[in-house]
Image (cartoon, grey):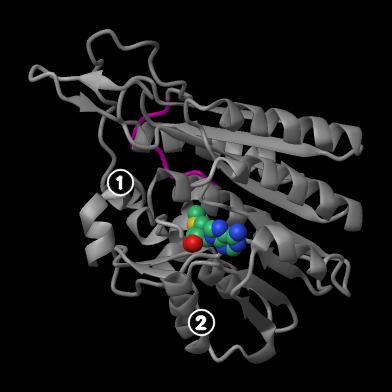
Amino acid sequence: MFSYRHAFHAGNHADVLKHTVLIATLDHLLEKEAALTVVDTHAGAGLYRLDGDYAGTSGEAAEGILRLLAPPKAAPAAAPGAGKPPKTAAKAPDAPLADALARYLEVVGDFNPKGGARIYPGSPFIVHHLLREHDKLKLFELHPTDARTLDANIAQLEAGRQIAVLRDDGFGSATKFLPPPSRRALVLCDPSYEIKSDYARVLDFVAEALKRFATGTYAVWYPIIPRPEAHDLPRRLKTMATKAGKSWLHATLTVKSSKITTDATGATHRPGLPASGMFLINPPFTLKPLLAAALPQMVERLAQDRNATFSLDAGG
Ligand code: SAM
């Protein structure tokens, strides 16, 4: 069975990127009155305690959301042998936050009325928080413990038939909701990539989803790690979107080098997740300018060494 638990990673730099993009995309899609269906193929537990045991063990939020909430610091000093300086827009570190980042913090803040980020909302709670009564949310989660926790967390919302929680394979079953009756949908595909085959399953899933519902908005998160499948994934998604005549957007955020280092005692240190990306098909036209302003600030605030950088491309 799976060992990945999102609670260890909640609020990390990858969540900052993913959830900033998710919120900016939803804000745009919700401007139209017609009902929207959101399908979250890999939902996780829904809500996380950043002061709880899981988050405390890894401390990943400390290098993510918690850095955004702290007063801005100057850029980190160059590490020996480090490469180019961060690709930022060279703004003063105390410049006002870009709209998309400010909005992300506002949404997380809604779950923490006393300030800080003791509670971190996962994608199901972020989405539900933004949806209107006539919109729908379909959540897939396969891990038995996380599925149970998700069920219990969602039950507290008393959302009735607006939210469906399915303890089922998101890759295999989520397309059954496409196209939704209103023919408006956002599909978030956010696997753990714990199994190498997840990369191929993402591609098969998006291909099938596009076949069923070509005008939906699709958002895929992926880790940028030294593995051929991870590098191929955005390239293949781009080819798929282009062949289908669909617009696409690709944003990446790198916070540190992916190099494995050896210390004076000879012990090796793996860097943890150094970077991640979001690939969208049929993105809102508003997303690119919002991210063009937000990504340099993510680099400024979340950089762990001089390899921190971002990229933003779009086409179609
Ligand atoms: N989307 C969540 C968020 O942003 O808060 C985080 C999801 S986490 C990265 C991935 C989740 O997918 C894990 O909770 C894992 O148990 C679950 N999972 C793994 N394989 C799955 C599958 N085939 N179908 C549905 N869920 C799966």
Residue 163 sits above or below residue 283 on the image: below
Residue pointed to by mark 1: 67
Residue 25 pos. (x, y %): 67, 54
> Which residue sits at x=30%, y=46%?
67
> Which residue sits at x=29%, y=40%?
72
What secondary structure is found at the residue carrying circle 2?
Answer: helix
Direction left: furthest residue = 265
Q: Is residue 19 left or right of residue 283?
A: left
> Which residue sits at x=9%, y=16%?
264
Label disc, if present, on residue 151 of the rendered structure: 2
Residue 316 makes an appearance in the image: no
Q: In this view, does 113 lie to the left or right of 28?
A: left
Choose top left, top right, bottom left or bottom right for residue 43: bottom right
| Residue 213 in magenta stretch | no
The amino acid type, in three-letter code, at marker 2 is Asp
> Which residue sits at x=46%, y=84%?
152
How many residues crowd mark 1 within 10 Å: few (<14), some (14–19), many (20+)?
A: some
Choose top left, top right, bottom left or bottom right for residue 11: bottom left
Residue 18 sits above or below residue 54 on the image: above
Q: In this view, does 14 lie to the left or right of 199?
A: left
Q: How many marks?
A: 2
Direction front: furthest residue = 1
The C terminus lies in quadrant: top right
Given this view, does label 1 or label 2 mark the residue nearer the observer? Answer: 2
Residue 311 pos. (x, y %): 57, 27
From which residue to which does the magenta span run?
Answer: 91-99
The amino acid type, in three-letter code, at marker 1 is Arg
Q: Is residue 200 left or right of residue 43?
A: right
Mark 1 close to ligand 1, CB under 8 Å:
no
